[in-house]
């Protein structure tokens, strides 16, 4: 009996030891999945685009990744599978839990992401926006590709040039809450009212950063507005979708298409005449500039107006809005589209 009791006690103790070891092992594995400076000894910069899989944002991420490698940072690129602010908020919360050093967001909705970004700042994380801003009080720095006024007026001038200074046009935007597109549209309207009184904006239609939706929206616009002369597609997936629809409907040159897109995404359509131009900036440089400015924040430095940034050039800095501006927009046309590859 005594031997049996001793054996039982030993077995129980052994089992308890195994369970304890298993529990410790589980915690270690969970900790091992946490991506952050504890894994590499490097500071971690996390970039959150509006949507993963967009050629525009993926190109920006490549530039950001290059800068991160040169500057000695760990780079984490993560984002929503659709242009959805709620998904962005969840991702930001996850990054706060991972204790990254910098969070950089292209906001789908400036107000919706603001509370999560403020929470990140309260946790000691540096917070920046790029491409599309949040509420200004919810970030420390905004990296802007160009000024909204310059771009909006430029796009309106392009539209007026293509449709001959009069007639109806429509705007195909990313989403009705996208902060950057909405400000661009505001300036397009200002330019239209000031310089082109014979041009009429008939509607603003969302494409939700979805090329197929842009395709179907373009078909709907053409059917709904028989006198439509032009479309301005203000997202890098909207213009290819619109061009594809114009081409399939046999309307090359009849519906004038301008927009914001990469040269690679629009090359075939510009050459075929389904689109007249695409306007953008060097997206890879935008990503590079964003990480370079993240280093400025981490080093406790403030950008200066006119400072020279490697591979980017001179930038503009607005201290009152804490906004870094990369430069002027660039048009891709039949004449120059083959000179660019991004």
Image (tube, rainbow, N blue to C red):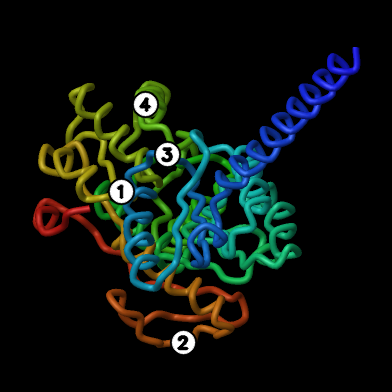
Label 3 crowd (10 A; few <14 / some 14-19 / many >=20)? many
Relative to 31, residue 217 above or below: above
Q: Residue at x 39, y 57 (%)?
A: 196
The residue beneath circle 4 is 212
Q: 262 or 231: which is nearer to us?
A: 262
| Closer to the camera in the image, 170 or 23 | 23
Q: From the viewer's perspective, is the residue at label 1 or at label 3 nearer? A: 1
Q: Find disc 3 in the rendering and name its residue.
A: 172
Q: Is residue 315 left or right of residue 253?
A: right
Image point (51%, 66%), residue name = 41
Label 4, label 3: how far apart the Cα atoms are? 13 Å
- Dot placed on the residue nearer the N-terminal end, 2 or 4: 4
> Pointer 2 and pointer 4: residues touching (CB < 8 Å)?
no
Asked if residue 28 shows in the view, the reply is yes
Residue 184, disc: none
Disc 1 versus disc 3: distance between alpha carbons? 13 Å
Q: Earlier in the sequence, mark 2 or mark 1?
A: 1
Query: How far is disc 2 from disc 4 in space, using C-alphas?
Result: 41 Å
Q: Secondary structure at mark 1?
A: loop
Other residues around mark 1 within 10 Å, as few (<14) / some (14–19) / many (≥20): many
**Does label 1 or label 4 sit earlier along the sequence?**
4
Q: Residue at x 62, y 41 (%)?
A: 30
Between circles 3 and 2, the one closer to the viewer is 2
Q: Nearer the viewer, mark 4 or mark 3?
A: 4
Q: Position of residue 170 (x, y in %)?
A: 41, 39
Q: Secondary structure at mark 2?
A: loop
Q: Are marks 2 and 1 in contact (CB under 8 Å)?
A: no
* Residue picked out by circle 1: 261
């Amino acid at each position: 009996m005594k031997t049996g009791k001793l054996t039982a006690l030993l077995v129980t103790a052994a089992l308890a030891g195994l369970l304890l070891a298993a529990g410790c092992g589980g915690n270690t594995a969970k900790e091992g999945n946490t991506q952050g400076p504890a894994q590499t000894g490097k500071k971690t910069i996390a970039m959150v685009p509006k949507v993963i899989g967009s050629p525009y944002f993926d190109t920006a991420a490549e530039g950001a990744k290059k800068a991160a490698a040169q500057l000695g940072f760990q780079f984490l690129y993560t984002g929503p599978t659709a242009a959805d602010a709620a998904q962005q908020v969840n991702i930001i919360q996850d990054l706060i839990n991972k204790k990254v050093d910098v969070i950089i967001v292209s906001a789908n909705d400036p107000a919706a992401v603001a509370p999560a970004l403020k929470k990140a700042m309260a946790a000691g994380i540096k917070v920046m926006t790029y491409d599309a801003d949040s509420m200004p009080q919810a970030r420390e720095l905004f990296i802007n590709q160009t000024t909204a006024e310059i771009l909006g007026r430029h796009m309106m001038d392009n539209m007026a040039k293509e449709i001959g200074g009069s007639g109806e046009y429509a705007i195909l935007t990313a989403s009705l809450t996208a902060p950057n597109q909405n400000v661009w549209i505001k300036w397009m309207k200002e330019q239209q009212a000031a310089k082109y009184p014979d041009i009429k904006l008939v509607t603003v239609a969302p494409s939700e950063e979805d090329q197929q939706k842009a395709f179907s929206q373009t078909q709907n616009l053409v059917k709904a507005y028989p006198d439509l002369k032009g479309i301005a597609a203000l997202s890098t997936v909207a213009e290819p979708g619109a061009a594809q629809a114009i081409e399939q409907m046999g309307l090359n040159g009849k519906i004038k298409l301008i927009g914001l897109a990469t040269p690679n995404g629009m090359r075939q359509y510009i050459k075929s005449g389904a689109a007249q131009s695409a306007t953008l900036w060097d997206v890879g440089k935008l990503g590079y500039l964003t990480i370079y400015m993240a280093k400025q924040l981490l080093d406790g430095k403030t950008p200066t107006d006119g400072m020279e940034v490697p591979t980017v050039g001179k930038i503009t800095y607005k201290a009152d809005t804490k906004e870094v501006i990369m430069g002027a927009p660039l048009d891709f046309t039949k004449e120059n589209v083959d000179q660019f590859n991004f």
